[in-house]
Amino acid sequence: MKDLAAQLAQIVHQHQWDKHYENLLQSALKDPDVQSFLTTYQIPPESAVIKRNLDAIYEFVHAKGQAHFTGDYQPHLIWVNQTIHVSYQPDAALRQRQRQQYFQQKFQTIDMASDVRQASLEDFAQGAEGRLAAYVAALEFVATYSQHSGEFIPGLYLAGDFGVGKTYLLAAIANELVHKDHNVLLVHFPTFAVQMKNAIGDNSVLERVHKIQAVPILMLDDLGADALSSWIRDEVLGVILQYRMQEKLPTFFSSNFTMHDLKLHLAVNQRGDQEPIKAARIMERIRFLAREVIVAGPNRRFEK
Ligand code: ADP
Ligand code: MG
């Protein structure tokens, strides 16, 4: 008697569960994405294929509901070897984030404001009065560098007053290059110089110099903004530029000084000593690595 009751209870339980399961599957089959998948592959709704693949169909509909909350990976039904499978692919937002991470890796910066990643050549060209020469030179560089990789192409030395958009242009060129799959490092040189002095303490000077000297495209922003010590000028800047000259690696600069005036600036070290020969040696390397372009125009810093 007891056995029979237990058996009965089990049958009722099983039956209800089956009914519940059946309901879930029926609603899964009604899902519009499932329907269009079945139509695409001409799978009849009552067929054996459906019965064999109910678990995949159910998983798909369930995961689709979940993906709304978790975002990242969207389920898709795929038809492989006469069997239905669920495949998970990154959705548009995730793909966008992955793309951004990829470019972030190609465009490295040291001590630059994060908005440099938004700079674009098209925006630089807006109201290009005084900037036209620099804009054209930038386009020319990007086009030639992309076509003849391997051959040395000089970078640009952007000279111009405070606020005309030199840093912005360097960043815009960098963004254009990384979207063509080149690697760029943009360095705020005055801050970098201070860091290098601190690096003497932990013996990491050589390691840091090696790291930045070898990047495919190097941009040194704001050269000459501060008086340099002889050590930074000769052992850091000089060594980096020497390496890039030997390896024929394009290098960009920006400065408030023209090349002519930078030579005078570099000839006087932080202590006030005159060292024209050392300055001339640095200038030779800069002249080899980059073409001077004057950026003119209004001071953009007061427009904001
Ligand atoms: P510089 O390096 O010559 O001193 P910046 O590149 O820092 O000048 O430009 C000064 C300010 O103007 C910055 O805030 C920069 O973001 C902005 N700026 C410069 N050019 C543009 C541009 N074409 N579009 C939008 N903002 C710009
Ligand atoms: Mg600047």
Image (tube, rainbow, N blue to C red):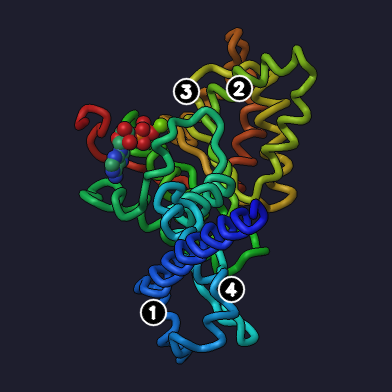
| Dot 1: element | helix
Task: Name the N-terminal-most of marks 2 and 4.
Answer: 4
Circles 4 and 3: CB atoms closer than 8 Å: no
Q: Which residue is mark 4?
A: 85
Circles 1 and 2: CB atoms closer than 8 Å: no
Q: Residues within 10 Å of mark 2 (few under 14, many from 20)?
A: some
Q: Amino acid at mark 1?
A: Gln
Q: Report the mark closest to the observer, 1 or 2.
A: 1
Circles 4 and 1: CB atoms closer than 8 Å: no
Task: Name the N-terminal-most of marks 3 and 2.
Answer: 2
Q: Residues within 10 Å of mark 3 (few under 14, many from 20)?
A: some
Task: Name the N-terminal-most of marks 3 and 1.
Answer: 1
Q: Quadrant of residue 36?
A: bottom left
Task: Name the N-terminal-most of marks 1 and 2.
Answer: 1
Vertical position of residue 273 compared to residue 76: above or below: above
Q: Which residue is mark 1?
A: 35
| Dot 3: element | loop
| Dot 2: element | helix
- Residue 89 location in percent, x, y? 53, 63
Q: How many marks?
A: 4
Q: Amino acid at mark 4?
A: His
Q: Amino acid at mark 2?
A: Ala
* Furthest residue in direction top, as rendered: 271
Label 1 to label 2: alpha-carbon separation: 64 Å
Q: Which residue is mark 3?
A: 225
Ligand 2 is found in the corner quadrant, namely: top left
